[in-house]
Amino acid sequence: MRIRSLGVIDDAVVELSPGFTAVTGETGAGKTMVVTSLGLLLGGRADPALVRIGAKSAVVEGRVAIGPDAPAAVRAEEAGAELDDGALLISRTLSAEGRSRAHLGGRSVPVGLLGELADDLVAVHGQTDQQGLLRPARQRQALDRYAGDAVAVPLAKYSAAHKRLRAVAAELEELTTRARERSQEADLLRFGLDEIAAAEPQPGEDTELAAEAERLGHAEALASAATAAHAALAGNPEDPEGVDGTTLVAGAHRALDAVRSHDPALSALADRLGEIGILMADVAGELASYADGLDADPLRLAAVEERRAALNHLTRKYGEDIAGVLAWSERSAARLAELDGDDDRIGELTAERDALRAELGELAQALTDARTASAKRFADAVTTELAELAMPHARVSVQIRQTELPATADAADGIEVGGRTVAYGPHGADEVELLLAPHPGTPPRPIAKGASGGELSRVMLAVEVVFAGSDPVPTYLFDEVDAGVGGKAAVEVGRRLARLAKSAQVVVVTHLPQVAAFADRQLLVEKTHDGSVTRSGVTVLEGEERVRELSRMLAGQEDSETARAHAEELLETARTGR
């Protein structure tokens, strides 16, 4: 793995070769360079404060050697990335304004994809992870991770059933707690539907009635106008001497028709007068029929107005017009059917909830059995590793228990496991806790209470070594996980890390010379500044330079003969005692 960072507070290129690499330097010097840059490469939070003052952006580039069949390589190729001569190129750019961009194998990708690849590429562990290991939830996760498919398969089934149970319970709660509101809503819908059904409105009826009311209300005026118009066109029988329009047009047509053969233009006008005469005769006939058929019936008008009032009552409450009223009726009928079916739905949901709770009980028991079977092997493996880390008498055990609910508790708060009603959650009914007995004769106690800082560091390292055997990743980065460890224990930590490096790449940021001495390669990170800009330089230590750095780490004096002798002895011990 090769990391190149520009503008990330410091500028440097760090070559992390296979095997065991120790990164040393003054307090804080190596952490920013390696841990922060690697965190950005693996999708970590992009903090603009990481950009060095005066720089427009920070760029971190990484080159990770990886096989073509590795899970990370397969996932990267699915995203369109390509391997470069057996290596995966990763880059992350962070602007001073906070914008972040990621590239993978020559392709621009979402930052979240880098986070997906992180679990298959690098396992990063620091002092915060030690504190996380104190939490029972993290201890359960550690056991589940160790157990592999033995727990993962039933856990996946349990999680799916638990998710469905929560959805069913939420819907059931909504139906039962809002029963009064839903009943009131149903009553209002029934009342409205009954009103509409009683009126039996027809599509377009309101428009037709409005037109009829207008006609009936002005029947006398309409009849008088139609009669006058008919007389003007066809003549008044009571006035034989009167001149009507039809007679005049007919006379004009006869005058032109007599001479039409002499001029085509005049012939065309004669034809038009003929058409006008026919049209006037038709209109006159229709006016006569209209006047005869018009009935000024006050009873009919009253009936029309009454019907319109009934329809207006509906439109005021349910829609702008009758079409809107009918649409509201259709929607409300569907909603009422839904509300009326609530009782049936409540029964169905109750039955499904009970079935799911029973299923969860069986799956929770399967989870407990799988965890119990893996717990003994996990505890024995961690205990064996602790013996390699200068804790030969320490014993680790895993306690798996459930919280039984009292008889007075709500049945919905628990599930039945092994004949008992116990509390449960999304990961089962088990509470998992790592117990440590550091010395013979001492009772096992939770590691949160029974482990010192140095012991906790070694417990976490032992857990990671166990994981390396069951769920390996290519690279492990330990950020000062040896805090609180010294003397012989520090030597054993270094020796165990060196053994882990035989099967994976191990990078350790450390201030312990006993750990650094076991590294295949030691990098020194030194900070320099010119009064305005701070930079870090990375130097590969070999030979005399490495002895001087170990002497400084031991005694704070590079040229101390005693420290030099001790440093050389550490290196010799590391070479011969791995």
Image (spheres, rainbow, N blue to C red):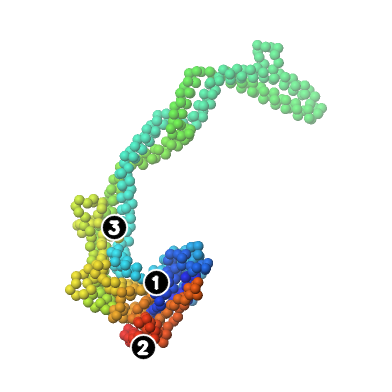
Can you give x and y, in whole percent of width and height, for residue 104 in the image? 48, 69
Dot 1: what SS?
Answer: strand
Q: Report the mark closest to the observer, 3 or 2.
A: 2
Find the distance from the CA under tag 3 to the CA under tag 1.
30 Å
Dot 2: what SS?
Answer: helix
Dot 3: what SS?
Answer: loop
Residue found at x 25% / y 62% = 431
Mark 2 Cα-neighbour bin, 10 Å: few <14, some 14–19, many ≥20: few
Mark 1 Cα-neighbour bin, 10 Å: few <14, some 14–19, many ≥20: some
- Dividing the picture into quarters, in which one does residue 156 lie? bottom left
Q: Quadrant of the C terminus?
A: bottom left
Find the distance from the CA under tag 3 to the CA under tag 2.
61 Å
**Can you identify the residue that label 3 sits on?**
425
**Can you identify the residue that label 1 sits on?**
122
- Dividing the picture into quarters, in which one does residue 499 lie? bottom left
Q: Give the farthest residue toward the front.
A: 531
Can you give x and y, in whole percent of width and height, for residue 35 in the image? 41, 71
Q: Nearer the viewer, residue 576 or 362?
A: 576
Return the disc, 3 or 2, that comes first in the chain's sequence: 3
- Amino acid identity at mark 2: Glu
